[in-house]
Amino acid sequence: MTAVQLHIDHFIGIWDKSPVDFPLFPRSYSAEEQNEREGRFSAIQEKLKKLQSKKNRRALKDGDAGKSFFPVFRDFMESVFDFEPAHLEIILSDSFKNVSKDFFYKARQFGPELSPESIYQGLRNVWIMNGLQLMMGVPVEITPSVFAYSMIYPYSDNLLDDASLSAKEKKAFSERFSRRLHGELIVPMNFTELQLFRLVSMIESQFPRKDFPGVYESLYAIHGGQTRSLELINCNGLEEKVVAEICFEKGGASVLADGYLVAGRLSPEQERALFGYGVYLQLLDDIQDIKEDTAGNTKTLFACRGASVNLETFLYKTIHFGRKAMEELRCFDGTEMNSMLGLMNRSIESMTIESVGLNLEPFSDECLHNLEVHSPLRFEYLRIKKSKSKSQRLSLFKKYFEQAPDWVTLPKNSTWN
């Protein structure tokens, strides 16, 4: 039995034992408090629009745009979403801000054809890896491997999700990519493969294969998980246990690879903890993507379920499961572990509640009411904002970086060949 299978079995065991009752949350909101926060949200959006205006952008020079943006962003996170000062000290630290800017420019230089949405997709993984760097007590920075692995997502995931490609074409791509991950220097068949193979070379430059076998075992594991996840397409009648194993493998292996590409080496305990963190993030993704997965006939624990299946059971199990899995991350001994775990739990549970509020149909009125009182914003307000912007986080990301050409210079020696 492989280590990955052992991790899957461990977390399937936790999943099976997770309660199905409504979880307790640290904070609830009255209708008046939600109304207050919605007013603040709208006011802060107006401030961001003013910062984004051409007139103001011309007036802000020598880094003033960044200095103007971050206090507004802090106000947004603190007064609307109630993030604690210790949490904000992490995400608004100079190191986190600098790696975000650095990744944006490296991504734009490496793949000028990529959309802001694709760069944001990669940046989300950068933030996960930055969090792991903090937990491991290593510098928070964009290393060649942090960059490369985070850029693999926009290229490989988008190709595998492309509905215009046949299953045969996706399988052929997957096989070629697997050969490259295993060290073969094969000729790319298209531009996407060329970019992916360049990214693999960056990882090889930082972690030689003979010295860091765990790095490449983790990459084989995530590739295997992504390939196996193709079995979920077409709602093909897989048993629930098999669906759970496939979803756990894909999510767990992804963050396991994050960890290896940050540290180069991990202990068995650290491996397992990171795998569980990845499973939790995968379950969150599956909640967020219920509509898209159902429309695309992709089966998950939440999508393509019969009308008789009570999704609330899976939702509550997910939150209980995640809290248990996150505790295993205490095996890391970074200097800010309590604050980091608090930030991670707060962020994930906030996004889970928000995702339910944006996917009303599968959940009962009772479930929605019980969750809404733990949201700083009413679900109706969230849906209105969602209809105006594909993603509030993506919108903030765009507002931040649309100013960047005026106030950030591309770092020297910022590319890797």
Image (cartoon, rainbow, N blue to C red):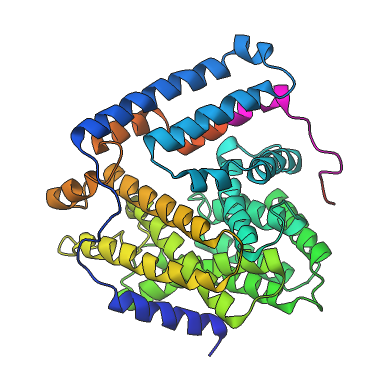
Q: In this image, 30 relative to 190: left or right?
A: left
Q: Residue furthest bottom?
A: 1
Residue at the spot 74% in from the left edge and 56% down from the top edge: 199
Location of residue 166 with respect to 119 vertically, above or below: below
- Let me know if residue 409 is in the magenta part: yes
User: Where is residue 260 shown, x and y percent of the image?
Assistant: 66, 69
User: Where is residue 61 shown, x and y percent of the image?
Assistant: 72, 17
Residue at the spot 70% in from the left edge and 73% down from the top edge: 216
Q: In this image, 71 relative to 403: left or right?
A: left
Residue 22 found in image quarter: bottom left
Q: In this image, 82 relative to 336: left or right?
A: left
Q: Is residue 302 visible?
A: yes
Residue at the spot 57% in from the left edge and 55% down from the top edge: 128
Residue 331 found in image quarter: bottom right
Residue at the spot 63% in from the left edge and 62% down from the top edge: 173
- Residue nearest the viewer, comparing 196 with 90: 90
User: Where is residue 180 shown, x and y percent of the image?
Assistant: 73, 67
- Residue nearest the viewer, comparing 62 with 367: 62
Residue 405 found in image quarter: top right
Q: In this image, 395 relative to 14: left or right?
A: right
Total labels drawn: 0
**Magenta segment, which residues?**
399-414
